[in-house]
Image: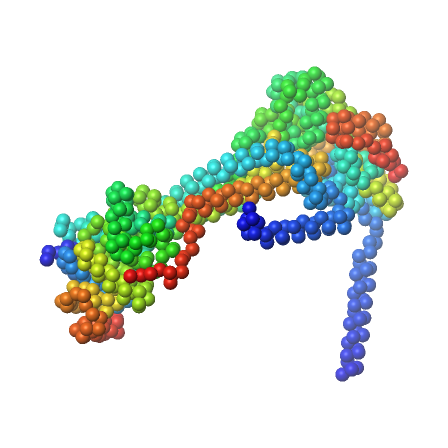
Amino acid sequence: MPSAIAAEEITKSFPIAGGKIPVLKRVSIDIRSGSWSTIIGPSGCGKTTFLKIMAGLLQPDSGRILTDAGEGDPRGLIAYMPQSDTLLPWRTALDNAILASEIDGRPREEARAKAKRLFARFGLAGFEALYPVELSGGMRQRLALIRTFLAHREVLLLDEPLGSLDALTRATLQDWLLSVWEELGKTILLVTHDVEEATLLSDRIHLLSARPAHVRKEFTVEFPRPRSRTAEPLVKLKGEILDLIHTEAFNA
Amino acid sequence: MKKIFAISIAISLLCAAIAISLLLWLSAPAISKISVILDFFANPNHVPIYVAVEKGFFAAEGIEVEILIPANPSDPVKLAAVRTVDVALTPQINFLIAKAADLPLIAIGALIETSLGGLLSLKEYEIEELSDLRGKRIGYSLAPLEPILWRTMLASVDVGSDEIELINVGFNTVLSLLSHNVDAIGAFRNFELPQVELLGHEPAYFPQEDYGVPETYEILLAVNQQLIEERSGELRAFIAGLAQGIAYTMEHPQEAFEVFLHARPDLDDELNRRAYAATLPLYAERARHDTPQKWESMQGYLFQNGLIDKLFPLEELYTNEFL
Amino acid sequence: MPRLFKEYSGTFLLLVLFLLLWEVGVRLFNVPFYILPTPSRILLVFFTNLPLLSSHGSMTILEVAMGMLIGGAGGIVLALIIFYSPSLERAIYPLIIASQMIPIFAIAPLLVVWFGYGLWSKATVAALIVFFPIVVNAVDGLRSVSGETIDLLRSLHASEWQIFRVVRLPASLPSFFSGLKIGITLSVVGATIGEWIGAKKGLGYLMIQSNALLRIDLVFASILTLSLLGLFLFGALRIIEQHTLRWRTRVEVNKTLRVKQ
């Protein structure tokens, strides 16, 4: 599989009063086209910063982002989903979903029709005319995710999309997200702190160290999907990753 | 225990008694007090009152006079009517309007016995005679009194109401005149007139009594009718003191003005000096306000022009028992 | 109508109680009418002078509306400048705040001299009073957009104009309406004060006139008219707001009613 997008030796520091905080130190990650990659690591290690750099929102101090088109602004390639749902409260669910198409200048009716189909396909039928304030937490995340998929971009960068949900809702949404990805394709780079989620969904897991973050270890998860949360190999992998994280956090 | 209790009660009662007596004693006026509210901001019209206070004329008559300044020119008659103040200074026109509105007032004297008002324009606006205001704009501040006065004046020189434009310019009459937003303003001959002169303009002034408006007492002293019976002694003393103040002012104008400035140092400027000079001949001699024709003609004029809807017999309008 | 009555029955009751106390109090203590008229007298004068009051009222409404338009437009422009230029913000904001400290009584005469005694001087006074709450609220509204929402749009390669049109503008509307609601009541006050300083027509002008004639009942009737005017304008604004911000009136539906698959 060719690379959809790759980060090469990304380094980033943030200035603070009286100096700088190094956040990322020569992080290199290669995302294969059509695959599901997950970045995991202790809190505050710079996962969101890395994702923002991948999204073209921040400039690294050194290193570069490589895409099919070469080096440069990855923005035509990626669809970024921030940590909070950033749904626009004054738009209906349907109109929120077509946000990216609207920015791109595509005709609205066409975008709406397509969104409606996806709504129907993925359990959001009947919610088109509702406002975000009328949706439950789980529904809002589904809507935000559908919006990200509808952005006509190849690579989806998801920053802890299920982090704000309760455990039960999260489990349901993990299965749902998997089914959406399997049907629609796309390349996914997920950031999460939930190890179980990482093992359940990913092809590859990149474990970041504590700050300044570098890639501590990479795991290739080859178990066939759909995976069971309680299957022994999965649980073993989860344990291994957790141990590593704990030592990282401890040493930070 | 009981003993201590009894003693403390006794002491508290004693203290209370002392406190109450003190309060009563302190609040009882050692000398009779009369409160006077001016018709407007303090200005040279009021010199005799300040003179009477400062030179002890009121004290010699056994009263203490407190001078108050109104927030609003329509307040004095109201406050006198409800007896919040004892004496109100007010123009005769305002007084008659108040009487027609059933305010229980009566006039006991006057401070200024002639008219002060008229129309003021500038020679540079090419106004020589009153009829030159045909087709022009006239600014005023007090509606609906002023428009009626000015229409009367212009009618007397055959200029109709439809041939002039009357504009309410609020309190900034001089400003609107000088900026030529209007061509003439209602003005006092002893204030705005010297004011524009001081600013270097040549005035064209038309006194209202020369053009069909009846003569009036520009500043009367009004009290609530009940005060005539209840405090006649003090009112008599007040008028006596005031008359002395007026006499002193007319005989010793320089000293009188110095005394006035001593009480009101903020009015020490050229404008006020000039205003004072213009006012000197106009104070009411011996505070008299009892020329019957002046009352009849003004009351009739206001009635005809719809500013009042009833007429009073003269004895209900003023009394000269204190003069 | 019945629903309206039910919703405001509390207000209505309080009002009736207040008026009763007023009426009884004035009669009991023999307060003269030229100090404080009874509500019954004021209402009588109000209804018998409706033509006069509506004639003057229409002038005041016009001044208020113009004031809102000018102040609103000016406020929006200033808000945009402040929001998009931090250096201009630092320069302008303190001046704007200082301007509000100058009492209207000081400025209004100047405005009357410059703009004459007709509509425009009063509209300007009203505009000056109104623009401040509008600026402050509009700026707050523009700033209310979360950084992450902006990130989202930038990641989609949205232009600055698109970000404004799609996110900032709609996000600032609730605050903007708050500013307008505050502004409209202030605009009525401003127009009235402007009329006290110099006018040919209007409810403020009528108040001064009536006061000089000791027609205090008419003064209060004018005040009543002004209050009704203010209420009406405020209500109209509320309706516009509710129509524009339909999404705000929806209540979050009980989550258990949502069936998730």
Asked where in the image residue B234 lies, by quadrant, the reply is top right
The x, y position of residue A49, in whole percent, is 26, 59
Task: State the residue at coordinates (61%, 37%).
Answer: C204
Residue sticking out furthest to the left: A1
Task: State the residue at coordinates (83%, 35%).
Answer: B317
Which quadrant: the N terminus of chain B? bottom right
Task: State the residue at coordinates (17%, 55%).
Answer: A185
Task: State the residue at coordinates (59%, 52%).
Answer: C9
The x, y position of residue C42, in whole percent, is 68, 41
Asked where in the image residue A30 lies, by quadrant, the reply is bottom left
Q: Nearer the viewer, residue B106 or A152?
A: A152
Viewer can see residue B114? no
C259 to B310, vertically: above or below: below
Judge from the rendering whether residue C196 lies leftward or rightward of residue A200; answer left or right: right
**Tell me, what colour scheme is on the image?**
rainbow
Which quadrant: the C terminus of chain B? top right
Judge from the rendering whether residue A225 lies leftward or rightward of residue C101; answer left or right: left
Q: Nearer the viewer, residue B47 or C145?
A: C145
Asked where in the image residue B227 lies, by quadrant, the reply is top right
A135 to C232, vertically: above or below: below
Judge from the rendering whether residue C228 lies leftward or rightward of residue B192; answer left or right: left
Q: Nearer the viewer, residue B100 or A235?
A: A235
Q: Nearer the viewer, residue C104 or A145?
A: A145
